[in-house]
Image (tube, rainbow, N blue to C red):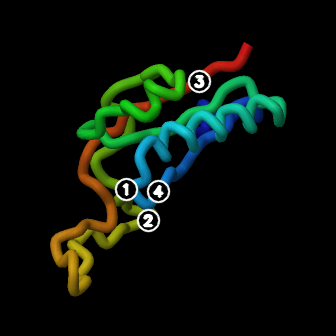
Amino acid sequence: MSRVLDDGKTLEVVRCCTDGTRNACSFLYSRMARIAKEMGYERIITYILESESGYSLKASGWVKDADKVGGLSWDTPARPRDEEPVQMSLFPQKRKYPKERKQRWKKEFR
């Protein structure tokens, strides 16, 4: 989570993975938000790739908070990253880190 947003009142969803079941992401995002609210958080955020639609988030009542956030690379002089494609037998062109900006989505609790 960004140091600016890490206020103790904001929860970040780092990853939402499903097996492809219909509406599973919407279900999970809505449940994560409900649990965050019950735990006393004031908002919940997540980041998705710029190329993703955000339909699951929108269906769960989340709103887009920002476009084009984040850098295109995690590589820094202090922390160099290996950004070459991962050589896996099924997906030889898959990258470890997407070279794409993100969208930030949030849901605020009243």
State which tag comes first along the sequence, 1 or 4.
4
Q: Residue at x 50, y 51 (%)?
A: 16
Q: Which mark is residue 5?
A: none
State which tag comes first along the sequence, 4 or 2.
4
At mark 4, the secondary structure is loop
Q: Residue at x 48, y 44 (%)?
A: 25
Q: Read off the residue under disc 2.
A: 79
Give the foreground label among 3 and 4. 4
State which tag comes first along the sequence, 3 or 4.
4
Give the foreground label among 1 and 2. 1
State which tag comes first along the sequence, 2 or 3.
2
> Is residue 34 found left or right of 58 in the rendered image?
right
Give the foreground label among 2 and 3. 3
Q: Read off the residue under disc 1.
A: 74
Q: Relative to 108, say whether 29 is above or below.
A: below
CB under 8 Å between discs 4 and 2: no
Q: Read off the residue under disc 4.
A: 18
State which tag comes first along the sequence, 3 or 1.
1
Category of crowding for the residue at label 3, using alpha-carbon neighbours closer than 10 angstroms: few (below 14), some (14–19), many (at least 20): many
Q: Which mark is residue 107?
A: 3
> Is residue 99 found left or right of 2 in the rendered image?
left
Residue 101 picture quarter:
top left
Which image quadrant: the N terminus?
top right
Q: Amino acid at mark 3?
A: Lys
Residue 32 pos. (x, y %): 65, 40
Q: Amino acid at mark 2?
A: Arg
Give the foreground label among 1 and 4. 4
At mark 2, the secondary structure is loop
Q: Amino acid at mark 1?
A: Trp
